[in-house]
Image (cartoon, grey):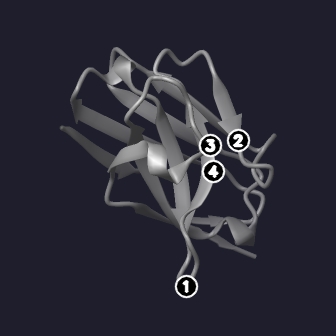
Amino acid sequence: QVQLVESGGGLVQAGGSLTLSCGASGRTFSSYATGWFRQTPGKEREFVGTISGSGAITAYADSVKGRFTISRDNAKNTVYLQMNSLKPEDTAVYYCAGSRYGSSSRRYEDYAYWGQGTQVTVSS
């Protein structure tokens, strides 16, 4: 079993930056990929980015590519989402997720473990 806890959300002005953290416990952290998803009311949870268990491979949604960066510190059991040049449309609840597999994935179905979410609000 894996437990994930996000932190770092908040209110930021458009153009600003924010870094989300996700601490993990349970299963060996480096053995599984992690992802970030986001959700706004009335919409499905949306893929943001993913990083493989080793940290060597990352992938991003087109909407955040070039602005967001995922990284992980396996020694600290923590994954990060650095968000720059934030836009009002980035406003959402952001979720950290743990995959069933070591390789990175964009597929919601590949993720078995989810954090409680952290709110990010970008004001215009």
Residue type at numbered disc 2: Tyr
Helix or strand or loop: what does disc 4 sit on? strand
Query: Mark 2 and mark 3 in contact (Cβ < 8 Å)?
Result: yes
Q: Distance between the residues labelled 3 and 4?
A: 4 Å
Query: Mark 4 and mark 1 in contact (Cβ < 8 Å)?
Result: no
Helix or strand or loop: what does disc 3 sit on? strand
Residue 54 position in % (x across, y down): 49, 15
**Quick one: quadrant of the N terminus?**
top left
Query: Mark 4 and mark 2 in contact (Cβ < 8 Å)?
Result: yes
Residue found 46% across the figure and 21% down from its top: 53
Residue found 42% across the figure and 61% down from its top: 118
Q: Answer above or below: position of 8 versus 101.
A: below
Q: Distance between the residues labelled 2 and 4?
A: 6 Å
Q: Distance between the residues labelled 1 and 3?
A: 21 Å
Residue found 43% across the figure and 41% down from its top: 21
Can residue 102 be seen here? The reply is yes
Q: How far apart are marks 1 and 2 (CA)?
A: 23 Å
Which residue in the protein does label 2 denote?
A: 60
Which residue in the protein does label 4 denote?
A: 48
Residue type at numbered disc 1: Gly
